[in-house]
Structure formats: structure tokens, C-alpha cells
């Protein structure tokens, strides 16, 4: 279809050109990518999970075109917490033939404000904004528009000056990853700089990122989603959310991990599967959760987190990161006797105490951009390198 004097061609946004999303919901104003299918979403009414799974971390539009200009109408939804400084709005990364060439932020959209003290939620609505990418070469190229990892994005319209066709990725293996807000990309500056995206680039694989902020909690519906999603390589990064939510005790943790892995194996009996233990995080190494905002930092206009548990509570089975690492390694070692495709990666090899001294966690919980870069590079080399658990993906 040709629109107006500039001869824009509007292409419907479908899953044919959307990579990394498991479902596409039609809304009143466009389409919304989801990283959990409707059946899984229906089994949990947690607003936190609903928010983060709709934030399209790792999701990107992929197509081939000769167009020198691209427009994308989007309706972002941003979440603010009363009394907490707002985080920067989400970034859209334009990648052409594998190279980042432009970035943009969306205007307009909806803003949801949450008062953590009272639980009150208010919403302000606005119109969609338009992202414009111009000055591109007119030769045929593969274009990727990576959607923001930290805000919901409804996609309203995609326009180009030349026709496009879906990008092809049949030659690449699919890496399915699950983790916490660190895997979702919290504190990374843009969607292509989150550590799973960087590792996927090193491994030259197609990423499906099921990193859910605050929600890597061994949920059965997440395990079933991993089980039912086609993939050549799978990894699960477990631990930090189980600690900082104070969700379960040691007695429940071990059977829950076994059950989670059993469910994945029902659909992927011989797929390379990597269990990654927590990165170094001083506030929870030996102190249980729950975690909370640090009120002193908030008073100074900064976001920081603290552990509110008592180290003495470890005797009652409260979880710490040190315990979780030891237990995950023991579980994987036990299972690997019957499962040669199961592997363990110690999170401290990706980001440890010496890394914290050099690249500290700005909010005591989440890595910043340089730390995401280090984690992604290390996991990329370790997992996809020769002899690594995913090494065959590059053969």
C-alpha cells in the first residue's frame, strides 16, 4: 500500500518479521509482543511478572529491504514508582547487516505510576510516537530494530520507502535463555548491550530471552514454556530472585530445581542445557532476603537495594547466594551422571568479587553497561567456544 507523497509502504507487523517473541497480542492500537504465552500468563496474577514479560527484551523486527528510510509508530508504556527517580526511557537499536548504526527513543505513550507505600496505581495515556531512521544505504540489507528491554512497546505501524521481506535465520541455531532482571538487561544502556544479546552475537545464534525482572522463581509455567519452545540450546540462570524475594526455604528449593529441570527435559531430552548460578552480589552473599529499596539512597535521590534478612536465619533454611551456588552445582553434578548434555556454569566466573571491585553494581544489585559487556563476552567465550557446552552451535 502506498501512502502520501513520500510513497511510504506500510507492512503489517506479524510474527513473520518479529524475532524473540513467543506471542503477538492484537490490541486496540496495534500489536504487543509477549515473552510468555497466554496460557502461562493466565496462571499468575502477579503485576510484576505481567509488566516485565511484556517488556520486549531481546525482541526485534528483522527484515530485508533496499529502503533508505524506516518509520516505526510505537506506543510505549513506562512504569514509575512514586518517590523513586525515573529511569531513562527505552532505546530502540537499529542494526544493519550486523552493525549498530542508529538509536532512537519514543515520545508519547502511557505512563503508569505505582505508589509502593499505598499500592495505588495511576495511569496517564498519550498518543503513539514515531521513530524515524534515515540516511541508510539503498542496497539490499538485513535490518533489525531491537525493541527496548525495559519498557512495554505496542507496535502500531511499520513503513519503508521500498518493499521488505522477512529476514531469514534458518542457518542459525536458537538459544533459549531464562533468568532474572540481570538477564532482562536492567541497567544496560540499550537492548543490544544486555549481556544475553552480546553473548548471542558472539555465538552467532538466534536469541529468545526469557529474562524476567524479579520473576526467575522456578515457576512451573515458565518451565513448561521452556519445554514447549523449539530451541537448539537452553540456559537457565537461577538464584538471585529466589533470595531477594525470600520466596522459599532450602527444603523447597532443591526439589523445585529438580522439577524445573525435569519439565524442561520433557520437551528437550538431549538439548544442551546450561544451569548458571548467581553472579557476585555482596548484599545477598551471606544475608538472606527479602531485598528492599535502601531508604537512605532514596532520600539522596538515588536507587539502591539492601538485604533486610538476618544472616542467623540461614539456620532456618533461608536462602543466600553462597548456598544457592553450592546446591546448584551439587544438583547438576548429581543429574549429569544420567544427563551428559547438562552443564553447570558458576556465576562467579562471569562476574565475581574482583569484578565488583573494578565494576561495582551501581544499585548493589544490577550490573551497569560495562559489566554487562564483560558478562556477555565471558559467557560467549565460555559457552560457545571450542569445547564449551554450546560450542557445536558454531560448527
Image (cartoon, helix red, strand yellow):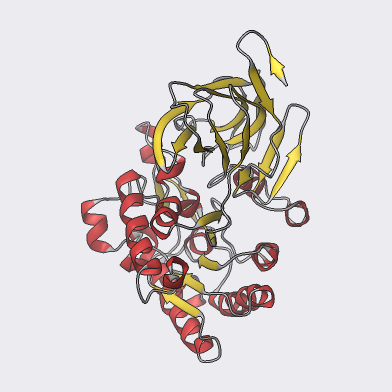
Q: On screen, 370 above or below 173?
A: above
Q: Is residue 225 above or below residue 27?
A: below
> The N terminus is located in which quarter?
top right
Q: Quadrant of residue 9?
A: top right
**Residue 335 visible:** yes
Question: Foreground: 224 or 296?
Answer: 224
Q: What residue occupies the far bottom of the structure in this picture?
A: 337
In the rendered image, residue 289, in percent from the top left (x then y), is placed at: 48, 60
Res 211 visible: no
Instruction: Place residue 217 in its image quadrant.
Output: bottom right
Q: Which residue: 64% across, 78% down?
A: 262
**Residue at the front extreme of this rendering:** 139
Q: Residue placed at 36% from the left, 40% from the top?
A: 296
Residue 105 drawn above or below residue 118: above
In the picture provided, is 319 more to the left or to the right than 255? left
Given the current orientation, which residue lies at the most extreme top position?
5
- Residue 204: where, in percent of width, then height? 44, 57
Give the image location of residue 170, x and y in percent. Answer: 58, 57
Image quadrant holding the C terminus, namely bottom left
Residue 339 pos. (x, y %): 55, 86
Q: Is residue 273 above or below residue 93?
A: below
| Residue toward you, 161 or 49 | 161
Residue at position x 48%, y 26% from top? 105
Amino acid at each position: 500500500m502506498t501512502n502520501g507523497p513520500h510513497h511510504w509502504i506500510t507492512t503489517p507487523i506479524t510474527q513473520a518479521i518479529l524475532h524473540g517473541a513467543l506471542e503477538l497480542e492484537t490490541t486496540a492500537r496495534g500489536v504487543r509482543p509477549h515473552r510468555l504465552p497466554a496460557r502461562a500468563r493466565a496462571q499468575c496474577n502477579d503485576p510484576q511478572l505481567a509488566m516485565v514479560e511484556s517488556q520486549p527484551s531481546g525482541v526485534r523486527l528483522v527484515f530485508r529491504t533496499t529502503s533508505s528510510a524506516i518509520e516505526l509508530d510505537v506506543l510505549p508504556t513506562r512504569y514509575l514508582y512514586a518517590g523513586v527517580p525515573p529511569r531513562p526511557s527505552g532505546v530502540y537499536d537499529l542494526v544493519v547487516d550486523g552493525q549498530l548504526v542508529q538509536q532512537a527513543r519514543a515520545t508519547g505513550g502511557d505512563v503508569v505510576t505505582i505508589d509502593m507505600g499505598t499500592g495505588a496505581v495511576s495511569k496517564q495515556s498519550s498518543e503513539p510516537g514515531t521513530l524515524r531512521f534515515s540516511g541508510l544505504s539503498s542496497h539490499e540489507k538485513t535490518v533489525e530494530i531491537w525493541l527496548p528491554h525495559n519498557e512495554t512497546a505496542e507496535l502500531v505501524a511499520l513503513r519503508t520507502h521500498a518493499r521488505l521481506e522477512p529476514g531469514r535465520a534458518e542457518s542459525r541455531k536458537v538459544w533459549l535463555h531464562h533468568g532474572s532482571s540481570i538477564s532482562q538487561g536492567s541497567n544496560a544502556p540499550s537492548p543490544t548491550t544486555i549481556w544475553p544479546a552480546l553473548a548471542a552475537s558472539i555465538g552467532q545464534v538466534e536469541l529468545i530471552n526469557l529474562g524476567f525482572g524479579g520473576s526467575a522463581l522456578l515457576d512451573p509455567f515458565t518451565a513448561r514454556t521452556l519445554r514447549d519452545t523449539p530451541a537448539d540450546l537452553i540456559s537457565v540462570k537461577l538464584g538471585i530472585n529466589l533470595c531477594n524475594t525470600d520466596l522459599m526455604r532450602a527444603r523447597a528449593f532443591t526439589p523445585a530445581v529438580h522439577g524445573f529441570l525435569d519439565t524442561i527435559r520433557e520437551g528437550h531430552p538431549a538439548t544442551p542445557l546450561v544451569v548458571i548460578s548467581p553472579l557476585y552480589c555482596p548484599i545477598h552473599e551471606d544475608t538472606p532476603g527479602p531485598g528492599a529499596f535502601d531508604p537512605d539512597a532514596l532520600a539522596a535521590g538515588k536507587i539502591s537495594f539492601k538485604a533486610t534478612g538476618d544472616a542467623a536465619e540461614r539456620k532456618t533454611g533461608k536462602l543466600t547466594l553462597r548456598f544457592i551456588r553450592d546446591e546448584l552445582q551439587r544438583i547438576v553434578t548429581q543429574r549429569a551422571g544420567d544427563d551428559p548434555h547438562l552443564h553447570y556454569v558458576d556465576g562467579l566466573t562471569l562476574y565475581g568479587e574482583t569484578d565488583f571491585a573494578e565494576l561495582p553494581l551501581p544499585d548493589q544489585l544490577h550490573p551497569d553497561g560495562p559489566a554487562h559487556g564483560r558478562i556477555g563476552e565471558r559467557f560467549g567465550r565460555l559457552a560457545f567456544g571450542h569445547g564449551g557446552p554450546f560450542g557445536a552451535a558454531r560448527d
